[in-house]
Image (cartoon, rainbow, N blue to C red):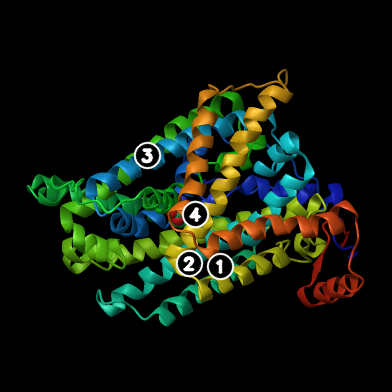
């Protein structure tokens, strides 16, 4: 079957389960993927195996990625003040915590996978839910991938150019190579992808520990001078500037909603979901605070703002002959994050095409490897284009702008459902003030940069989001399919050796 623009209905459940056992894959050391290498038509049951500890690990492992190794410089540059930067770092942590608590209510109320997609469906119906999956498959996931791989490339290249600005083309080339490598890992086997994930998660904790330990050592030696100049007065921040500084900071915290993709697998979710959030997010916030202090214990404000790869500069100042450890740990950490992000992107394709919201071919799996190769290739191609045409900073702005429209939308969904479904069971109920606050802040985050410094990019992004309706109405609502799409689907099936997950092949 190559039916086009139509869902593969319930047959995808098995695959979803296999992917579900993995989640973002980011931080579940020791967790085994259940049913991953089983034939797709084997029943795969979701087990409730995520307890409090793995819940916290999953949040921490997803959130810590590239951001803490690239954002501090950008944030300092955007605000021009150590004090304001630090406040923004902490505020980003608080905002993520509040957002995640609201998501805990949504996630325990509606436990189906697909997170935002499912909440929008419940609260607002089909079109907004479609727009979410349209934007997240075409923009959000690929741009996450592009940003992380560009950060990977920066760190992979930096040690060889000794703190000069590395040639942009080289960085982009390395970023593209890393995307291809991650694609290969994920197409090769689901198990390999999880193993990569688990090993590489440890690396980022090592990197954070080295930085925090080194910073503490320097502070004990009395190296506190750069920390004593908060420079509130010298700040260059305007209201729009502050919003984009938030974009930079919030990137480092992105992934705070990740447990919502696995609510079906959490043991006693009404207790463990909010508890993992209350432990995990402040833990990450604390790490980021300590890392920021450590950077400034070792380098000056201007050194930090100018540094191309702040953790490399840190290593060079502090670690002497072991300086190579830093870029190595960061490249491993970012590679692992990109791997987890692509993994989830593949899973997202299933969820969306199961609902008939994406081309069927994107939900097919390889006949022998059972990996969702078409979806992964599709995401990687978009990510490569983004790497070639974007920069880390522009992509982060673009990503955050778009993401916060939908995070705000989820808050609205919660508020709306309190009215429209007052009696639906809510095992965890968030104080209603919280979603209102997050909605307010997300509106500010989306509107302020446009008002402050109108840029075509914001218009393009908005047009693209609503442009999704031009696809939704004919192809999803009216059920049209393009005449030649069947042929293309069959052709791609031959080339990629992929089949719908319902196909039997013994
Ligand atoms: N916060 C991560 C970083 O700093 C990015 C996470 C991307 N988001 C995700 N859901 N995987 O690199």
User: Which percent across, then down, holds residue 230?
Assistant: 18, 46
Q: Residue at x 31, y 66 (%)?
A: 309
Q: Residue at x 62, y 38 (%)?
A: 410
Q: Which residue is mark 2?
A: 149
Task: Calculate the distance from the C-alpha at mark 4 to the C-alpha at mark 1.
Answer: 35 Å
First in residue order: circle 1 vs circle 2: 2
User: Where, by quadrant of the figure, is residue 47 drawn?
Assistant: top right
Q: Which residue is mark 3?
A: 91
Q: Which quadrant is the N terminus positioned in?
A: bottom right
For this orientation, the residue located farthest to the top is 423
Q: Is residue 344 above or below residue 436?
A: below
- Mark 3: secondary structure: helix
Task: Calculate the distance from the C-alpha at mark 1 to the C-alpha at mark 2.
Answer: 10 Å
First in residue order: circle 2 vs circle 4: 2
First in residue order: circle 3 vs circle 4: 3
How many neighbours does mark 2 have within 10 angstroms: few (below 14), some (14-19), or many (20 or more)?
many
How many neighbours does mark 3 have within 10 angstroms: few (below 14), some (14-19), or many (20 or more)?
some
Q: Which residue is mark 4?
A: 450
Q: Is residue 447 left or right of residue 467?
A: left
Q: Is residue 69 left or right of residue 294?
A: right
Between residues 207 and 317, which one lies in front from this camera angle? 317
Q: Are marks 4 and 1 in contact (CB under 8 Å)?
A: no
Q: Which quadrant is the C terminus positioned in?
A: bottom right
User: Which percent across, then down, holds residue 272?
Assistant: 54, 28
* Mark in front: 3 vs 1: 3
Q: Are marks 3 and 2 in contact (CB under 8 Å)?
A: no
Q: Is residue 111 above or below residue 320?
A: above
Visible residue check, residue 268: no
Task: Calculate the distance from the C-alpha at mark 2 to the C-alpha at mark 4.
Answer: 27 Å
């Amino acid at each position: 079957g190559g039916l086009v623009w139509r869902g593969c209905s319930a047959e995808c459940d098995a695959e979803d389960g296999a992917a579900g056992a993995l989640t973002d894959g980011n931080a579940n050391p020791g967790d085994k993927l259940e049913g991953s290498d089983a034939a797709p038509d084997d029943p795969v049951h979701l087990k409730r195996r995520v307890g409090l500890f793995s819940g916290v690990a999953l949040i921490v492992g997803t959130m810590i990625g590239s951001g803490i190794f690239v954002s501090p410089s950008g944030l300092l540059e955007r605000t021009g003040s150590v004090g304001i930067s630090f406040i923004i770092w902490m505020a980003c942590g608080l905002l993520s915590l509040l957002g995640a608590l609201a998501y805990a209510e949504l996630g325990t109320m509606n436990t189906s996978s697909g997170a935002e997609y499912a909440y929008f469906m419940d609260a607002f119906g089909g079109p907004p839910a479609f727009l979410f999956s349209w934007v997240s498959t075409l923009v959000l996931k690929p741009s996450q991938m592009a940003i992380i791989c560009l950060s990977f490339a920066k760190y992979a290249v930096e040690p060889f150019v000794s703190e000069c600005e590395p040639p942009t083309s080289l960085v982009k080339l390395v970023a593209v190579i890393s995307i291809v490598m991650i694609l290969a890992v994920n197409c090769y086997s689901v198990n390999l992808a999880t193993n990569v994930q688990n090993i590489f998660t440890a690396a980022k904790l090592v990197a954070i520990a080295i930085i925090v330990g080194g910073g503490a050592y320097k502070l004990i030696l009395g190296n506190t001078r750069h920390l004593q100049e908060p420079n509130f007065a010298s700040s260059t921040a305007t209201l729009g500037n502050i919003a984009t500084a938030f974009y930079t900071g919030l990137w480092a915290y992105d992934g705070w909603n990740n447990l919502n993709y696995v609510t079906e697998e959490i043991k006693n979710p009404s207790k463990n979901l909010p508890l993992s959030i209350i432990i995990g997010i402040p833990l990450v916030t604390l790490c980021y605070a300590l890392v920021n202090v450590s950077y400034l214990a070792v380098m000056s404000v201007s050194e930090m703002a100018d540094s191309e790869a702040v953790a490399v500069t840190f290593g060079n100042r502090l670690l002497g002959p072991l300086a190579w450890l830093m870029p190595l740990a960061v490249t491993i950490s970012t590679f692992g994050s990109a791997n987890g992000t692509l993994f989830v992107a593949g899973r997202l394709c299933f969820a969306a095409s199961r609902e008939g919201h994406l081309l069927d071919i994107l939900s097919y799996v390889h006949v022998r490897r059972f990996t969702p190769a078409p979806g992964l290739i599709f995401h990687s191609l978009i990510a490569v284009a983004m790497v070639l045409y974007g920069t880390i900073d522009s992509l982060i702005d673009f990503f955050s702008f778009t993401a916060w429209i939908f995070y705000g939308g989820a808050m609205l969904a919660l508020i709306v459902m309190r009215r429209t479904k007052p009696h639906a069971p809510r095992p965890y109920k968030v104080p209603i003030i919280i979603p209102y606050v997050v909605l307010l802040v997300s509106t500010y985050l989306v509107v302020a940069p446009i008002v402050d410094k109108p840029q075509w990019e914001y218009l393009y992004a908005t047009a693209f989001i609503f442009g999704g309706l031009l696809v939704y109405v004919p192809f999803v609502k009216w059920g049209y399919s393009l005449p030649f799409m069947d042929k293309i689907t069959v052709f791609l099936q031959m080339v990629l050796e992929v089949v719908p997950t319902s196909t039997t092949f013994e």
